[in-house]
Image (spheres, coloured by chain):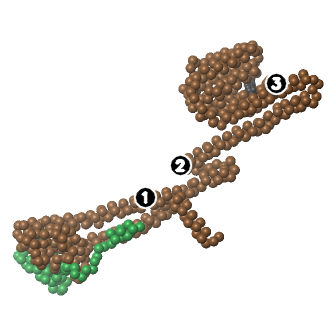
Amino acid sequence: MAWVFALLLLFAPSVSAEHAAPRLMSDSPEYCAELLGRFAALGPQVSSQSRALAEEGRKLCLEGQSRSGIAKLRRALKEAQREE
Amino acid sequence: MTAPAEENGGWRDLGAYLKSAGFRFATLFAVLFLAAMVGFAFMLWWGTAGTLSRQIDDAIRADALGLQEAWRSGGTAAVVDAIGERLAVDIDDHAIYLLADSAGLRIGGNLDRWPAVAQASWSWSADTVRRDGVAVPARMHHVPLGQGHRLLVGRDATDREKLRTLLSEALLWSFAVAVAFAIAGAAALRRALGERLRAASMTAGAIAAGDLTRRVPLSAQRDEFDQLGASMNAMLDRIDQLMVGIKGVSDSIAHDLRTPIARARMRLENALMSAPDEETLRAAMETTVADLDGISRVFQALLRIAEAEAGARRAAFAPFDLAQVLADAAEVYGALAEERGQHLQTSWPDKLEMVGDRDMVLQAIANLLDNAVKFTPQGGTIRLNASAPARDRREISVCDEGPGLAPEDRARAGERFFRADPSRALPGSGLGLSLVKAVAALHGGGLRLGDAQAGAERTGLEARLILSSRA
Ligand SMILES: Nc1ncnc2c1ncn2[C@@H]1O[C@H](COP(=O)(O)OP(=O)(O)OP(=O)(O)O)[C@@H](O)[C@H]1O
Ligand SMILES: [Mg+2]
């Protein structure tokens, strides 16, 4: 029967609630700003589609929804990268 | 009954149960079933969660190699640039990067500090990072870059953990179901085994209790249990046959030897009481000695028949030449026939090899010739022929010119003490053909009686003894 418990331990998700865990910084308003800066640096030749995505992202960031905003901005950047 | 004794009995029952074949088979079944289940779970895990893990690790490794390349070509700045570019287009938001200097301070990437567990150089670790204050699992790979700089590349492993949790829950449930099935299946197997064996053990019990007519009931499945049952039944039939044989001998002794013994006793008593002179007394005693010789011959014949029927002599089978045996018999009975004005004609191949009991076969041939000589009138001819009609078959036929046997008597001619009505006047005890039949059966053959010359006034009798030449 011991192996059943071993199996249970093996299958159990390894979540340890450590408070000193490092923090991810790529969902902060600062990162929003960084991405906006990156987008701006691309210059005027980006398509209207990615520009629209970036604009949506900027709005979401301003509304405080950094994560959604960042996701939009990333898609805008990816779109622009793809066009090049 | 006292409590300890009861408990003792309980333990003994449990011990017997654990030792039973049914329990062992059932356990084997359960173990095999569960082993198959574990194998299945392992394959499933390896194919899903395992594959996902490997994919994540491959992506991380490729990522890290690319950044190491950037480090070699452009140093810190190039790595920071590359990380920035990668993070900027990370739509899934799974990527984790950290470039730290020799003091462990962050230079670039999206992690605020070096994780505590990722200390060893060039290794992998699983850890948690905080995203919006929530701890999420992460898979991380750390690489030393030179000049004390360290790079950490990782992926958010939330999806993988979710899959793992889901899978382990599903597997645990199916494992529980499998255990239930294994136990139920094992119990059913044990029960079925017990059920199938019960018929045989009940029959054996009934027979041990004295009911010899009982047989193991066979099912239509014709499986191993039925084979066991069939061989048990064959064994019981054989035992039954032997019992009948023994009973036959004792019955014969009881019934058919009582009369001659009583007659001999009467004769002696009469002579003792009323013999007028010594001469008469002597004559009576001589007759009685002859009677007793006859009784002892009958005894011997009965015992031989019983011996042949029991098949115990099969162990003494040996190869011999049947032609030689026929020659021996013909020599004795040829002289006897000559004395009675009869003629014995013989014909058989030079060699007739076979495996069997030589003495028994000689006795059987002698009995047939004895009958032929006894029933054939003066001047008649007796023919003794033998042949090998097939590779493992030997046939010996004795034909005479006597009165023959009515068809209804032929069937009974092999019974002990049977003598057809017309031959009552002739000497004999009715045991000769019984022995011939028993010897034939012992050698896997039989005895056939028929007309020697069908349609003739005197049909004569043809006795055909068939033997298998192999043991
Ligand atoms: N060759 C034969 N011709 C006619 N009848 C026969 C012949 N052989 C056997 N029988 C019949 O079958 C009966 C049984 O024969 P079997 O040899 O068993 O006994 P038996 O010859 O009478 O006595 P035993 O052989 O014991 O001295 C005989 O009594 C006779 O009626
Ligand atoms: Mg006879």
According to the image, label 2 marks what residue?
B224
Q: CA distance from mark 2 to mark 3?
A: 57 Å
Residue B40 sits above or below residue B451 on the image = below
> Where is residue B343 drawn, in percent x and y?
70, 14
Chain for numbered disc 1: B
Q: Are marks 2 and 3 on the same chain?
A: yes
Indicate which disc, 3 or 1, sits on the residue closer to the N terminus.
1
According to the image, label 1 marks what residue?
B32
Foreground residue among A20 and B418: A20
Which element is circle 3 on?
loop
Q: Say which colour chain B has.
A: brown
Task: Report the amino acid beneath label 2.
Answer: Glu
Q: Nearer the viewer, mark 2 or mark 3?
A: 3
Which element is circle 2 on?
helix
Which element is circle 1 on?
helix
Q: CA distance from mark 3 to mark 1?
A: 79 Å
Q: Residue furthest bottom?
A: A63
Neighbor class of circle 1 (other Cα within 10 Å; few <14, some 14-19, many 20+) is few
- Number of numbered labels in the structure image: 3
Task: Report the amino acid beneath label 1.
Answer: Leu
Dividing the image into four quarters, tell me where ligand 2 lies: top right
According to the image, label 3 marks what residue?
B425
Q: Is residue B309 left or right of residue B128?
A: right
> Where is residue B21 drawn, in percent x and y?
52, 56
Residue B108 sits above or below residue B413 on the image = below
